[in-house]
Amino acid sequence: MKTEELTAKILNENPNMDRYQLAIAVAARCDELENGAQSKLSVNTHIVKSADLALMEIAEGLVVVKGFSDIEK
């Protein structure tokens, strides 16, 4: 899935989040991945950039952005 599609999916599922808050969340997860955190997806981390991986993890709901998750899901 393209970056734009992932971003749209996340923002549609989280109406309380805007694109700037999403960028901060992606950056935070990217830092974690760059500092040795294990990916929650089974992808080759040598091929996929950490920013793309962070966005994919958030889109799949594997990483929850505090303050923006929907409890009823």
Image (spheres, rainbow, N blue to C red):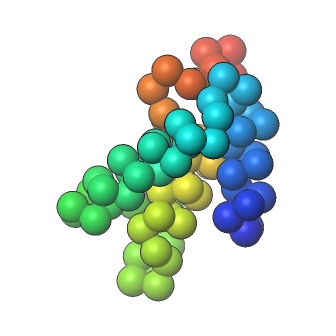
| The furthest residue to the top | 72
Residue at horizontal 61 percent and vertical 15 percent from the top = 71
On screen, residue 61 above or below 52: above
Q: Would residue 45 appear left or right of 10 to someone viewing this image?
A: left
- Image coordinates of residue 6 in percent, x first then y, are 70, 55
Question: Can residue 71 be seen in this snapshot?
Answer: yes
Q: Quadrant of the C terminus?
A: top right
Specify the quadrant of the image occupied by residue 11.
top right
Instruction: Between residue 47 and residue 23, name the one nearer to us.
Output: 23
On screen, residue 61 above or below 2: above
Specify the quadrant of the image occupied by residue 16.
top right
Residue at horizontal 38 percent and vertical 58 percent from the top = 30
- Image coordinates of residue 28 in percent, x first then y, are 36, 47
Residue at horizontal 68 percent and vertical 64 percent from the top = 3
Question: Can residue 38 be seen in this snapshot?
Answer: no
- Image coordinates of residue 14 in percent, x first then y, are 69, 30
| The furthest residue to the bottom | 47
On screen, residue 33 above or below 17: below
Q: Would residue 7 appear left or right of 24 to someone viewing this image?
A: right
Residue at horizontal 78 percent and vertical 37 percent from the top = 12
Q: Quadrant of the N terminus?
A: bottom right
Q: How many marks?
A: 0
Q: Would residue 5 appear left or right of 31 to someone viewing this image?
A: right
Instruction: Between residue 60 and residue 22, name the one nearer to us.
Output: 22
- Image coordinates of residue 19 in percent, x first then y, are 63, 42
On screen, residue 44 above or below 18: below
Instruction: Between residue 22 and residue 20, name the one nearer to us.
Output: 20
| The furthest residue to the front | 20
